[in-house]
Amino acid sequence: DTGVSQDPRHKITKRGQNVTFRCDPISEHNRLYWYRQTLGQGPEFLTYFQNEAQLEKSRLLSDRFSAERPKGSFSTLEIQRTEQGDSAMYLCASSFIQSNTEAFFGQGTRLTVV
Amino acid sequence: DQQVKQNSPSLSVQEGRISILNCDYTNSMFDYFLWYKKYPAEGPTFLISISSIKDKNEDGRFTVFLNKSAKHLSLHIVPSQPGDSAVYFCAASVGSARQLTFGSGTQLTVLP
């Protein structure tokens, strides 16, 4: 399978705990994006990397969120001190660096904070 | 503020007929538009895109139309098939980062 892979698919955690998600992009893709989707809404941009550099972060990304992409390959998204409002689907996408090229999405990680 | 709007939460169409999904945007700087399809418990799947320099792009049963003056785009699916039943998201981007701004989606149901 050469698509975008996310792990885990589902995560249930207690409020206040830390969680970490992993994304493996399509190997040739330079860009990697994180989005969050809540029920009834479209995905919302969180942050993106070009190779290993994190170039942009949305104001949705509070201080409790941190993302990394060491060596420009896989990426991790960590949420510290989770809150119930963090419950959502977290989607990862990757694309080539050229303009006007589509992003390919993974299947997402469904986070439930109880 | 919602920069990309899909005002119809749902649409039902008979198999074989045309499905027309609509999308409006407010940011005139958007220069690249995409449609994604999403099944439950899966990530969005890319369908078709259009650059702002064009007004139409066609790929098989799918055609996207862009009306820049009205800030409106639409996706036509002809003929519609039951397997097309899914949530369809319109998305737009601007600048080199290509981060996407999504609409809230339209649930398409194609009735056999």
Image: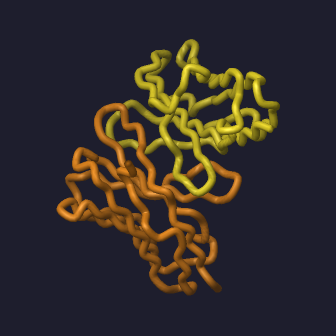
Chain colours: A yellow, B orange
Q: Going 68% across and 21% down the picture, which residue do you hit?
A: A80
- Please state the total of marks drawn on the protein image: 0
Instruction: Specify the quadrant that holds the N terminus of chain A.
Output: top right
Instruction: Report the residue that reaches farthest toward the top.
Output: A71
In this rendering, does residue B18 appear at all?
yes
Q: In this orientation, which residue lies closer to the viewer: A41 or B79?
A: A41
Q: Going 45% across and 81% down the picture, which residue do you hit?
A: B18
> Residue B76: x and y, percent?
41, 72
> Residue B44: x and y, percent?
57, 51
Q: In this orientation, which residue lies closer to the viewer: B44 or A63?
A: A63
Q: Is residue A73 above or below residue B105?
A: above
Q: Going 35% across and 65% down the picture, which residue do you hit?
A: B64
From the viewer's perspective, is B42 left or right of B107? right
Instruction: Report the residue that reaches farthest toward the left.
Output: B69
Instruction: Specify the quadrant that holds the C terminus of chain A.
Output: top right
> Residue B109: x and y, percent?
60, 76
Q: In this orientation, which residue lies closer to the viewer: A82 or A102?
A: A82
Q: Going 62% across and 41% down the picture, which residue do you hit?
A: A106
Q: Is residue A65 above or below residue A43?
A: above
> Residue B105: x and y, percent?
51, 60
